[in-house]
Amino acid sequence: MSSPIASPRASNLRTGRASRMLEVYVWVFLFLIALPILLVSVISFSPTPFLSFPMQDFSLRWYGRVFEYEPFLQSLWTSVELATASTLVASIVAVPCALALARSQAGAAEWVTVFLLSPISIPGIVLGFALLYYLSNLSVGPGFLALFLAHTVIAIPYISRTVLSVYRTVPRSIEESAVILGASRTETIFLITLPQIRYAIYSGTLFAFLISLDNLPISFFFSTAQTNVLPVVMMSYLQNQYDPSIAAIATIQMLFAVIALVLGEKLLGIGALKSI
Amino acid sequence: MIAGIKTLSPKTVLRSGALPVSISGVSKQYGDTMALQPLDLEVAAGELVSLLGPSGCGKTTTLRIVAGSPDSGTIRFGTQDVTNVQPNRRGLGMVFQSYSLFPHMTVEENVAFGLRMRGVEGAERSRRVAQMLDIVHLASFAKRFPAQMSGGQQQRVALARALVTNPSVLLLDEPLAALDKNLREQMQFEIRDIQRRLGITTLLVTHDQEEALTMSDRVAVMCEGSLLQIGTPGSIYTRPRSRFVSAFLGTSNLFSVMTLGTDDRGRIVVRLDASGLVTSAVPGDPAWTPSPGKACVLAIRPEKLSFRRHEVGESPQGMLATMRQRVFRGSYEVCEFAVEGLKSPVVAYTPESGAGALEGDLVDLAWHEDNAVLLAD
Amino acid sequence: MSSAVQHTHASVDRPGRKTRSRRDYAVALPVWAAPAIAALTLLFAVPLAHNAWQSLTKEEATADAFFYYRKIISDPYYRGVLFETLSVSFIVTVLCLLLSYPVAYYLARHARRSRSAILFLLVAPLLTSVIMRTLGIRLILAKQGLLNALLDTVSLGPIPPSLLNGPFSVYVGIIHVLIPFMVLSITPVIQRIEPAIEESAVILGAGALRTFWHVTLPLSREGIYTGCILVFMMSNGSFITQLMLGAGKVVTMPVLIFQQFNVTQDTAFAGAMGNMLLIMTIVCLAIQSLLISRSRRPQ
């Protein structure tokens, strides 16, 4: 439908030099955002032990190094285990909570929602520190259990947030129709409510999973020699050894995230990403 | 009619065959506002009653009570007291204003849902779904999703979904409000037709008086949480009992009058405050006989007024008026008159274009006494 | 059947009524929120409260509850760290806003087919490791990094190392990480402004710039507030960037906490600093809700 406005000034808003400049700016901007990530992937194929430009050759030696250096793979695996476990438990706890809060008319519901979403806003290092001393007072020292508890607490708000915002847009009358047609509470939830919000659950869970994989501020307080997560291992490697194998493992981790996203999209549909 | 069933097993529902609905003393409060004053309403088996009124009058609240629970009072379907029966076991059919189709299910699955909840499986279920889709002329849309259909089609799916389970009572909450005018008029006839054929007791909520008049066996006019008047469309229209009802259905010319007494045919004789014209009127409420000297309101519908040019020198035949405006409205014309002593113009509708008088002419306004309705206020 | 007419108050349109009548219905029971609330209370609220209490009662604070807090505010070094935290966050926020707004505007108004591509490019970095992104920045800005290599090819001198290993790199690093959040905060708010409003301004005689300044910008302020507060808070909590790019020259609160924990093991002091950071965060959130409720009040 054509715009009813034909004045030359108006057309400046749509086409013309200004908006072309804007377009150029945006694409340069996006390129600069992507550049660091691309660089790291590129450098992971560098033949030399130091990171420099320009690159002469291709080499897979750093990927080999990744497989040699046990802490890399071990910690990657630990991170994946941790992310999976904490995200799963968090979603079991967070989804019903979000369902209850979204429709609640009680005045307290607003405060509870703020409380529920607050861990996202708190600097990770503060929470990690506080949890470390608190848990050790309860005889839960650094290790997988402590990590699991910490990551679950972080995952809950991420999942609740997406589920809440999507569920609030689902009209109540759809569930009411189901009830009037004879559905019990359980039938309504599994046949009507959950299918409506499934994309929110998936994307919230996926997001929480990826956040957990990358979490450094909290995880670093709980790492031990036996139980270490990848970001912490990468950090200390960077500070002590600093060679392109760090770029290699970072690229592998990125591929991991990409695979998780693509799998999510294939299995659950493109809508899986719409609500991030 | 079901005789004496007191307990319901989880999957039994109140079966079809039209059931009368009886609402007594039902009220509802939200916070500190009384949304519904204690209300009594009887709907006969197979009847379609409209609840008509402006926003906030309590009509939707009443409908939802039939599907839910009141603060006080009882609801009965036939002899069965359903006030405390869970909504999913009352055997109701309901269509919401927004249709509320399940977006993730096909048309077929939507319509089949109620049957599925009642444990109707396999061939029987498919047969009934197909039959209902036929009735609403949507057989070829069975595999489509709601998002791929127009508003009118979605509405018919919602109707099919509500009816396929043979409910004893059908509730319609402003089902046509989201449709455009032509479609709405067509659907009014279609819904009424289906309802009559299936003989389902129906409650329809609407704010559109034309819709209420077109579709209903009886119309219940509500205002501010109470029921003002209930009656057939014709009787409500020609014999309103209050100013509100008379103004809400169609338009009325309202004149302040003083009662003088009754004449020998039982009509009330009144005198117009403004012009002193004396005429007789019929009371809106047949049971009401106002005493002389009472201030009342006389209501005359615009389409019941006729006029012709006043011949100079003749004595006035009716009310003397000057034509101010004449507006073409398609199938009729609206004429506005100024009458001495009256602040608002008097309005008349005429099907003849251009005839009778021109703007600026002096006319005699006349009407049949049967069409002059006296209202308390 | 009652036919009485009510004369209590004038018949008035009450649009609020329709939504209220649906209050009764919810498929979820309120008690379902209990496990999540319990989890958060036990593993989030209580530990933070415990930490606050520790900082007011342990070690040097046994005699004087506010010992550590006074130390942070009175000691010039620690005061400097506090100030540094706030100023870094402030500069990052302003720069993020200036760089992001045009992108948000473009995304909201102009991008049609490229919309999902742009969103993807904005969100995808959030899914890669922070370490990876910061490493990438280092690769660009290092002495033998991409930037110097490029400048070399056009025979411009290398950037002085003092610039690269210090505040400049840290700012670039933090801005790179936080910019997507700013864009994603502002874009939906601009989208909600009906284009017809901007067109009306043009018809009334405003040029593109004046329309932007008088119409678009004020109407998008809620997004600006949200984005700025979010970026400010997140910048307060960042320390990986400082560690990896700052060469020790940029010391903000989280960096200090990290160092205190690793080196001195002075847990009460670290706890107090963490608490300060927490208080700063809460103040930010309070300001945000104040600004937003003010901007929503009818003018």
Image (tube, coloured by chain):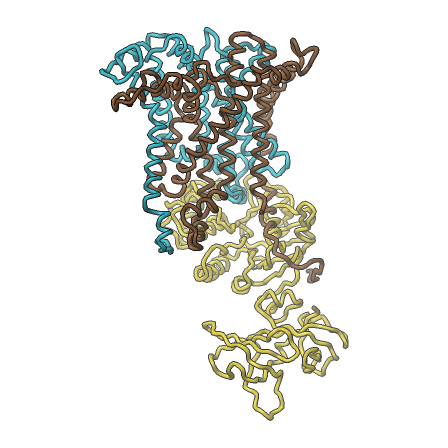
In screen coordinates, is A259 left or right of B151?
A: left
The hue in which chain C appears in the rendered picture of the protein: brown
**Nearer-the-camera pick, C55 or B283:** C55
Residue C293 % position (x, y): 58, 39
* Extreme residue in the left direction: A57
Residue B75 visible within the image: yes
**Nearer-the-camera pick, A95 or C99:** C99
**Nearer-the-camera pick, B36 or A17:** A17
Q: Residue at x 62, y 79 (%)?
A: B339
Residue C156 % position (x, y): 29, 22
The hue in which chain B appears in the rendered picture of the protein: yellow
Residue C131 % position (x, y): 40, 18
Quarter of the view holding residue C52 = top right
In screen coordinates, is B210 left or right of A235?
A: right
Quarter of the view holding residue A272 = top left
Figure check: C33 above or below A250: below
Residue B289 % position (x, y): 73, 73
Figure check: B374 above or below C34: below
Figure check: C129 above or below B181: above
Residue A92 visible within the image: no
* Extreme residue in the bottom direction: B313
In screen coordinates, is C295 left or right of C116?
A: right
Figure disc tally: 0
**Nearer-the-camera pick, B17 or C100:** C100
Q: Residue at x 47, y 36 (%)?
A: A191
Q: Residue at x 54, y 32 (%)?
A: A98
Which quadrant would the C terminus of chain B be assigned to in this image?
bottom right
The hue in which chain A appears in the rendered picture of the protein: cyan
